[in-house]
Image: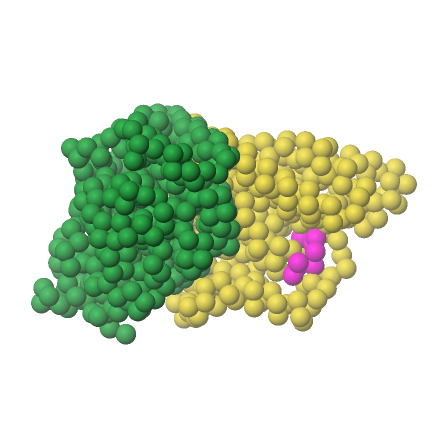
Chain colours: A green, B yellow
């Protein structure tokens, strides 16, 4: 029952974040140097991804409050202005145009890669900057690269290759992998990156892995029984569950009768974070490794991490902040460092300052590469399992930080990413 | 044989019964009141959330009997909501153009989504299948989850019961007569407004009980309202617009074809539902069972 109360409190508290942001959004435009520095958050505050948008808003709000309590940036307070993209590309473009029209040239946030890819080409004309806090598509820093877009979060290539590195370290004999993936751009991008990592690291270990063809499902599918039946007949020992979030909960729920989680030695997912465990409780797949944008438990003792975690828990009573909280928090810190460095909030000055920027964040130091504007940072993973003894029914059974030492690709802005190790 | 025929057939039948259970209330209300209730999914979702809350209240694990009882309670709660909706929304809609019902029920759908967010939040939830239904049955190499067999049985039994009521009872005959000519039924002494209220409450009850029954199969979130809408309206339209038998047959046809299509052409999952729907409408634009209400 404690969990229920916490969840209600979380909703109320996150709602309060929304209320505060709405008031901020109604404030009159101001670009005066003496006025507040206005940062525009674009996030899915309604629609199917609202839950993530609320996390993004929470992280951004905490960062802005912390900065203001510490005296602001260049002696100016920071004001958060929010716009809802509904995880929809058209709504995202409208949100960014609206912000630019309101005099907000410094934007951040965005969950959906589709939204980020739609917004990116419009920024130069609007003389705006966007720091992407979550959208992970590789294209954003490759063929769709634009000077006005930065990504302070990790990207699909780095995360999924790091996941491959993790599983081959922990399960060196699990060398035959298959997948069930959503038929989306990010689903394909994630899988290609994971396969690339598996191929490279297994070859380096002298035990080449084998990849069985992935199954593709409709995003938002309601029934996975055909796919589960096929997976049950698979000879693979490792399962990459590319369906994520609510879809993964549905898939694992339907797979229980088949014993899917017992069939595979290792099951990984690209980034559902706490969603599967929170929804499934004691039915959480044992040993499931999940990718995280930021896992607070991995950085205990690091001041930025601890302050963010404590502020979040104080506001929400939720002890499990999603990684999205950390990533919008990080984007605000990136702007704070860049504005401080530039001594200005003008677009060109901030772009120049963000390039090659090194700054501290909730998961340690990050560097934004000058060439492609991609952040190089730690990659976080958490392992879950059921816990009959707790109210919530699950527990974290392990976590891992993979340093990005050769995990990310070399910067090639304007050029599609090359999966050097993945066979066609 | 098992991999490419029996397994997709079984899975397609299961999905068909899921869609049919979801659609029965919608079909009933459209067949009699001619109100295309866009909010149907919203009340299905509320039924699922009510059942979820009761399951949590009783400790998370349920027997099959308790699961059925909880689903029935969810149906009753949603049926009572239907009583309010009939009085406040559907009754006034009887006097205006049908187009207004689309707008009004869409608005009602948004209200249900907002209400669910306010009461239960936006997090994902799930409920495990009752232990007795959590296993599986093997027929040779064919793997059939017990829960799927149970839902297929419930779907077929629901259809059989509705058919029997419609074809062989006075209530059924009354329903069909009001559906085909409410004015004449009124002239012959039927209290049509009260009858409409009964149908709406019954339709909402069916939505709520379906929400409870299908709870272990789906993830709970405020998006659940729209999860089956496409399949439901597909079955409703292909079935002949408001005909229970047509909806039942259409659900089976569309879902089984989709199941085979998704297996054989896995790179285009879900596409075959639309191909089957388009083909059915081109070949039989009047629907599988045409001309007969209910």
Q: Position of residue B106 (x, y in %)?
A: 64, 44
Question: For residue A203, what is the image quadrant?
Answer: bottom left
Residue drawn where x is 45% and y is 54% of the image: A126
Horizontal side of A218 relative to B245 (left or right) equals left
Q: Which residue lies most toward the left here?
A: A206
Mark yes or no: residue B152 visible: no
Q: Position of residue B277 (x, y in %)?
A: 60, 65
Q: Which residue lies most toward the front here?
A: A33
Q: Who is closer to the viewer here, A290 or B179?
A: A290
Q: Who is closer to the viewer here, B149 or B79?
A: B79
Residue drawn where x is 41% and y is 28% of the image: A13
Q: Is residue A14 magenta?
A: no
Q: Quadrant of the N terminus of chain B?
A: bottom left
Q: Is residue A11 above or below residue B155?
A: above
Q: Is residue B128 above or below residue B53?
A: below
Q: Is residue A29 above or below residue A370?
A: above
């Amino acid at each position: 029952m404690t969990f229920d109360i916490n969840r209600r409190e979380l909703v109320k508290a996150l709602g309060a974040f929304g209320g505060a942001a709405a008031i901020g959004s109604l404030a009159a435009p101001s670009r005066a140097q003496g006025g507040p520095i206005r940062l525009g958050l674009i996030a899915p505050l309604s629609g199917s991804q609202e839950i993530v948008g609320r996390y993004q808003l929470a992280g951004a709000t905490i960062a802005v409050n912390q900065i203001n309590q510490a005296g602001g940036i260049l002696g100016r307070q920071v004001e958060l202005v929010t716009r809802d993209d509904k995880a929809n590309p058209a709504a995202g473009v409208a949100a960014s145009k609206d912000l630019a029209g309101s005099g907000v040239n410094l934007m951040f946030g965005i969950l959906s890669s589709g939204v980020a890819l739609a917004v990116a080409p419009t920024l130069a004309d609007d003389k705006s900057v966007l720091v992407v806090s979550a959208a992970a598509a590789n294209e954003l820093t490759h063929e769709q690269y634009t000077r006005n877009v930065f990504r302070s979060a990790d990207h699909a290539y780095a995360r999924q290759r790091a996941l491959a590195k993790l599983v081959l370290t922990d399960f060196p004999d699990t060398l035959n992998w298959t997948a069930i993936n959503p038929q989306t751009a990010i689903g394909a991008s994630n899988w290609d990156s994971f396969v690339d990592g598996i191929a490279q690291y297994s070859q380096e270990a002298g035990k080449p892995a084998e990849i069985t063809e992935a199954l593709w499902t409709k995003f938002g599918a309601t029934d996975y029984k055909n796919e589960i039946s096929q997976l049950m007949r698979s000879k693979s020992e490792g399962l990459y569950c590319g369906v994520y979030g609510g879809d993964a909960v549905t898939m694992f729920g339907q797979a229980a009768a088949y014993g899917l989680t017992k069939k595979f030695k290792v099951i990984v997912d690209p980034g559902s974070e706490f969603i599967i465990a929170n929804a499934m409780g004691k039915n959480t797949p044992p040993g499931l490794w999940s990718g995280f944008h930021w896992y607070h438990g991995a950085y205990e003792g690091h001041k930025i991490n601890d302050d963010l975690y404590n502020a979040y828990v104080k506001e929400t009573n939720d002890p499990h902040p999603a990684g999205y909280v950390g990533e919008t928090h990080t984007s605000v810190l990136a702007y704070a460092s860049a504005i401080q460095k530039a001594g200005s909030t003008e677009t060109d000055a901030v772009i120049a300052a963000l390039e090659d920027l090194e700054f501290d964040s909730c998961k340690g130091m990050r560097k934004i590469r000058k060439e492609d504007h991609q952040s190089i940072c730690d990659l976080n993973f958490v392992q879950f399992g059921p816990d009959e003894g707790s109210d919530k029914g699950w527990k974290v059974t392990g976590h891992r930080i993979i340093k990005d030492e050769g995990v990310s690709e070399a910067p090639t802005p304007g050029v599609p990413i090359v999966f050097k190790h993945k066979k066609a | 044989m098992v991999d490419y025929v029996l397994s997709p057939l079984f899975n397609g039948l299961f999905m068909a019964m899921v869609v049919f259970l979801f659609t029965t209330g919608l079909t009933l209300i459209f067949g009699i009141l001619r109100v295309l209730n866009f909010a149907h999914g919203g009340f299905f979702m509320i039924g699922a959330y009510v059942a979820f809350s009761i399951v949590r209240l009783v400790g998370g694990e349920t027997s099959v009997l308790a699961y059925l009882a909880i689903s029935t309670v969810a149906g009753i709660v949603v049926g009572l909501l239907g009583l309010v909706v009939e009085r406040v929304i559907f009754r006034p809609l009887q006097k205006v153009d049908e187009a207004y019902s689309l707008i009004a029920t869409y608005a009602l759908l948004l209200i249900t989504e907002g209400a669910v967010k306010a009461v239960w939040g936006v997090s994902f939830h799930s409920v495990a299948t009752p232990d007795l239904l959590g296993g599986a049955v093997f027929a040779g190499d064919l793997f059939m989850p017990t829960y799927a067999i149970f839902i297929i049985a419930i779907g077929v039994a629901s259809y059989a019961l509705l058919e029997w009521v419609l074809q062989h009872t006075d209530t059924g005959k009354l329903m069909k007569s009001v559906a085909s000519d409410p004015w004449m039924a009124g002239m012959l002494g039927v209290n049509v407004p009260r009858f409409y209220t009964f149908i709406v409450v019954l339709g909402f009850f069916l939505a709520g009980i379906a929400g409870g029954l299908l709870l272990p199969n789906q993830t709970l979130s405020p998006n659940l309202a729209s999860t089956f809408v496409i399949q439901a309206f597909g079955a409703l339209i292909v079935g002949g617009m408001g005909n229970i038998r047509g909806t039942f047959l259409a659900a089976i046809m569309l879902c089984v074809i989709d199941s085979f299509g998704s297996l054989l052409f896995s790179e285009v999952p879900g596409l075959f539902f639309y191909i089957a729907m388009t083909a059915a409408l081109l070949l039989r634009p009047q629907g599988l069972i045409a001309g007969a209400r209910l």
